[in-house]
Amino acid sequence: MAPQAAEPASPSRRERRKQEVRERILAAAARLFLRHGFEATTVDQIAEAADVAQKTFFNHFPTKHSVFEAFANGRLALFEDAVRAERRRGSSTRKRLERVFALMADHVSEVNELARDLVLHMMHAPPEDANGNEQFSTLQSAIGPLLRDGQEQGDVRRDHDVAFLTELIVGAFCMIMIQWAKDPSYPIRARLQETARFLGEAVAPPAA
């Protein structure tokens, strides 16, 4: 009889405590970023709001920027969750795209100026910035499976591969975000809705 695989060890009390402190710092930073913006928030303010010493802050995050990146990754995780939820729903790919884009419009409205800071950060990240590349990869890895589902159910075209169609959708989404980041008056919600409808038609099988 083959030996049973050992169950993963539970985190130690010290590891749990470390994770709790990290999450408390992130939560405090998120509240301050949303209230005052990234630039106006200081490490001292974050440490005080999280009830930790400044040294403790730096034990978890080397810079204020690294906290912001962790927050940004958390917002992208919401995008992944939204796409996974849509994949579980019985619907057309077009409707799924429209709902995902609408939800992202809601998230942008919720964090507003902080979302703009996030987009500008991704725009100006150098090519070697691993975190910036990871954020774009997150968008692609979320949309790709949704399109593969669509191919299986017959409402996504097969004359182009999923990678190409994914780049098309993520590229359009990112361009809208960039336009909005540069121009606060840009009608982001209306443009996301219009783009989602157009992309739903673009990825559909061509008419006979």
Image (cartoon, rainbow, N blue to C red):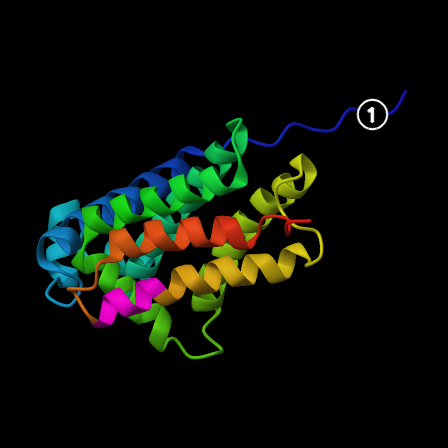
Q: Where does residue 6 sit, x and y in percent of width and height? A: 70, 28
Task: Look at 23% across and 44% down and name the residue there.
Answer: 27
Q: Can residue 62 be seen in this view?
A: no
Residue furthest to the right: 1
Magenta highlight on residue 150: no
Nearer the observer, 184 or 116: 184
Q: Where does residue 62 sit, x and y in percent of width and height? A: 32, 65
Report the side of 52 relative to 124 (left or right).
left
Query: Can you tell which quarter of the image residue 2 is in?
Result: top right
Magenta stretch: give its range. 176-182
Q: In this view, does 90 lie above or below 97?
A: above
Q: Is residue 160 above or below residue 4?
A: below
Q: Where does residue 129 sit, x and y in percent of width and height? A: 45, 73
Query: Can you tell which quarter of the image residue 116 is in?
Result: bottom left
Task: Look at 53% across and 40% down and name the residue there.
Answer: 93
Q: Name the residue under label 1.
A: 3
Nearer the observer, 172 or 72: 172
Q: Can residue 110 be seen in this view?
A: yes
Q: Where does residue 117 sit, x and y in percent of width and height? A: 24, 65
Q: Is residue 107 above or below residue 67?
A: above
